[in-house]
């Protein structure tokens, strides 16, 4: 009887919780691997060296922004436009981090700082879905497992893509660009099915980008369309948030 009681009182170790979080992240990891490989292939064929491709995945760690940057580099966009476009596109991570860590105040600040780098659309969605099942005070190790698994897979996929990029046939590598559109569609369609107004905002932003590209560089067209589309979304989607 005492042994059973002791077993029930067992407190999971950091390693046990870490593996639990890592197992939760497997669906995200499986989704990240082919997209990261595609990025690595396209990066090396765009002329970005191996080391810099890995640095981009390490520091930026945002699929949509990284693919967008490759496209902007390919069309000769200057650095400032790429930085601004990436900053604006990734502002949502700032909002997601605030939302996530407002429920994780028990986690030390130094760990929150590290974990914040692992916040992406998919990891945020995973953490939000698991919030109730993990209880009110989930361990730091569980979130470390979730986020490091996804982050590590993204880096490994990038490395694989860069290493095989020069031997992949040009026709195949060109088709890998569809990964960007698949990524956007995968995020956009479920949101539109839930809130149709999101589709209106997305369509308006795309139309603005086409319009601006008629008299501006493609880089600035993307930046302006993103800013105006985001501001429009604040007002159009306000009613949905109530």
Image (tube, grey):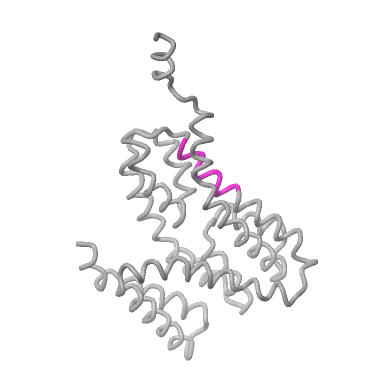
Give the residue drawn at x 58%, y 76%: 77
Residue 59 spot, x, y in % from top left: 56, 53
Magenta residues span 142-152
Residue 14 to residue 121: above or below: above
Give the residue drawn at x 51%, y 46%: 25
Front residue of 36 and 71:
36
Main SS of the magenta part reads helix
Residue 128 spot, x, y in % from top left: 37, 49
Give the residue drawn at x 38%, y 14%: 5
**Residue found at the very far top of the displayed protein:** 2
**Residue found at the very far bottom of the displayed protein:** 214
Q: How many badges with numbers are in the image?
A: 0
Residue 129 spot, x, y in % from top left: 38, 49
Task: Indicate left or right for 140 with 47 as reference.
Answer: left
Question: Is residue 178 one of those drawn in magenta?
Answer: no
Task: Indicate left or right for 128 with 170 as reference.
Answer: left
**Residue found at the very far front of the displayed protein:** 1
Task: Indicate left or right for 134 with 236 as reference.
Answer: right
Give the residue drawn at x 46%, y 51%: 123
């Amino acid at each position: 009887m005492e042994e059973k009681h002791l077993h029930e009182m067992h407190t999971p170790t950091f390693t046990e919780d870490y593996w639990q979080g890592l197992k939760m992240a497997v669906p995200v990891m499986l989704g990240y691997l082919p997209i990261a490989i595609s990025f690595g292939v396209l990066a090396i064929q765009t002329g970005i060296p191996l080391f810099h491709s890995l640095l981009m995945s390490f520091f930026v760690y945002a699929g949509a922004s990284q693919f967008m940057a490759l496209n902007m580099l390919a069309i000769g966009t200057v650095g400032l436009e790429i930085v601004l476009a990436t900053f604006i596109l990734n502002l949502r991570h700032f909002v997601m981090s605030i939302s996530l860590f407002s429920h994780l105040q028990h986690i030390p600040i130094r760990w929150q700082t590290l974990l914040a780098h692992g916040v992406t659309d998919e990891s945020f969605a995973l953490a939000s879905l698991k919030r109730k099942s993990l209880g009110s005070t989930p361990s730091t190790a569980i979130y470390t497992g979730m986020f490091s698994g996804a982050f590590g897979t993204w880096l490994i996929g990038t490395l694989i893509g860069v290493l095989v990029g020069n031997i992949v046939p040009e026709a195949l590598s060109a088709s890998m660009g569809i990964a960007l559109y698949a990524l956007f569609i995968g995020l956009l369609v479920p949101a539109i099915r839930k809130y149709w107004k999101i589709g209106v905002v997305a369509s308006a932003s795309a139309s603005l980008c086409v319009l601006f590209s008629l008299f501006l560089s493609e880089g600035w067209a993307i930046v302006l369309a993103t800013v105006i589309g985001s501001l429009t979304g604040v007002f159009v989607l306000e009613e949905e948030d109530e």
